[in-house]
Amino acid sequence: ETGVTQSPTHLIKTRGQQVTLRCSSQSGHNTVSWYQQALGQGPQFIFQYYREEENGRGNFPPRFSGLQFPNYSSELNVNALELDDSALYLCASSSKGGTGSYNEQFFGPGTRLTVL
Amino acid sequence: QQQVKQSPQSLIVQKGGISIINCAYENTAFDYFPWYQQFPGKGPALLIAIRPDVSEKKEGRFTISFNKSAKQFSLHIMDSQPGDSATYFCAASKSNAGKSTFGDGTTLTVKP
């Protein structure tokens, strides 16, 4: 059983550019959540995808968007990058059962994004 | 609006001592309260979690105490070891939906 993987590990972009981060969920998981973790802070929920549909969103502007693919892997896209977007971006996968309950979420190692 | 407040920000404990980290939440709809451990360069890993129908849960050296009326919960690490040195986050969510609200973290240093 493979865990949650993310790519790339590190990324440097300039202000105004666009970036795509990728996440492969753990085997058997159908739900992916994305978090932004600024230096010295706890992760902040960006959005969640369940079966290729957005299933909840945190307090982030529309320039943060995502996708989930049929194999449950996911992408996070950020347009018009700002300096404050510099952070560790974490993805977490979990499994939503038939009763609507969720199992625990497992985090990937994150992608460190630096915006200059 | 920060819905989960965590304290202290940093903690230094001697090997063998007890580490205690506290969290308070505001949203009474939260019903799942996990603690995560994060090492540098790694994502958070679930340590232990509790639901509000119990007041305490123990797993090995780790114990969560939960006070529903005060909307507070805490992590106790017994017999703290240098390998426990990490950042600890409390979190809260509804039905473990994966849309967790995190505290700002506590950096624990266990001195040998």
Image (tube, coloured by chain):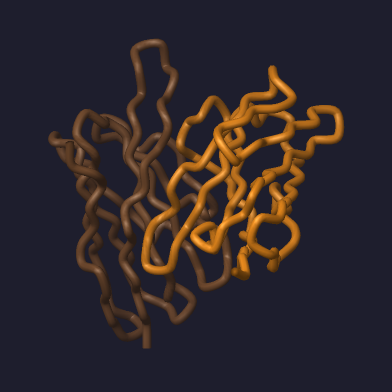
Chain colours: A brown, B orange
> Where residue A34 sits in the image (x, y, percent)?
38, 50
Q: Report whether residue B1 is seen.
A: no
- Report the residue at 69% width, 48% height from top: B4
Residue at the limit of the structure toward the right, as seen here = B70
A112 vs B13, nearest the viewer: B13
Total number of numbered discs in the rendering: 0
- Report the residue at 34% width, 71% height from top: A112
A46 vs B100, nearest the viewer: B100
Q: Quadrant of the C terminus of chain B?
A: bottom right
Q: Quadrant of the N terminus of chain B?
A: bottom right
Q: Report whether residue B87 is seen.
A: yes
> Where residue A1 sits in the image (x, y, percent)?
17, 36
> Where residue B80 sits in the image (x, y, percent)?
62, 54
Left or right of residue A2: residue A93? right
Residue B111 falls in image quadrant: bottom right
Instruction: Examine the rendered structure and indicate whether residue A44 appears above or below residue B57.
Output: below
> Where residue B19 sits in the image (x, y, percent)?
70, 54
Residue A98 falls in image quadrant: top left
Left or right of residue A66: residue A8? left
Residue at the limit of the structure toward the bottom, as seen here = A116
Residue at the limit of the structure toward the left, as seen here = A71
- Report the residue at 76% width, 45% height from top: B24
Instruction: Examine the rendered structure and indicate whether residue A31 appears above or below residue B7.
Output: above
A61 vs B54, nearest the viewer: B54
Instruction: Examine the rendered structure and indicate whether residue B68 appears above or below residue A75.
Output: above
Left or right of residue A23: residue B108? right
Instruction: Examine the rendered structure and indicate whether residue A86 appears above or below residue B43.
Output: below
- Report the residue at 41% width, 26% height from top: A103
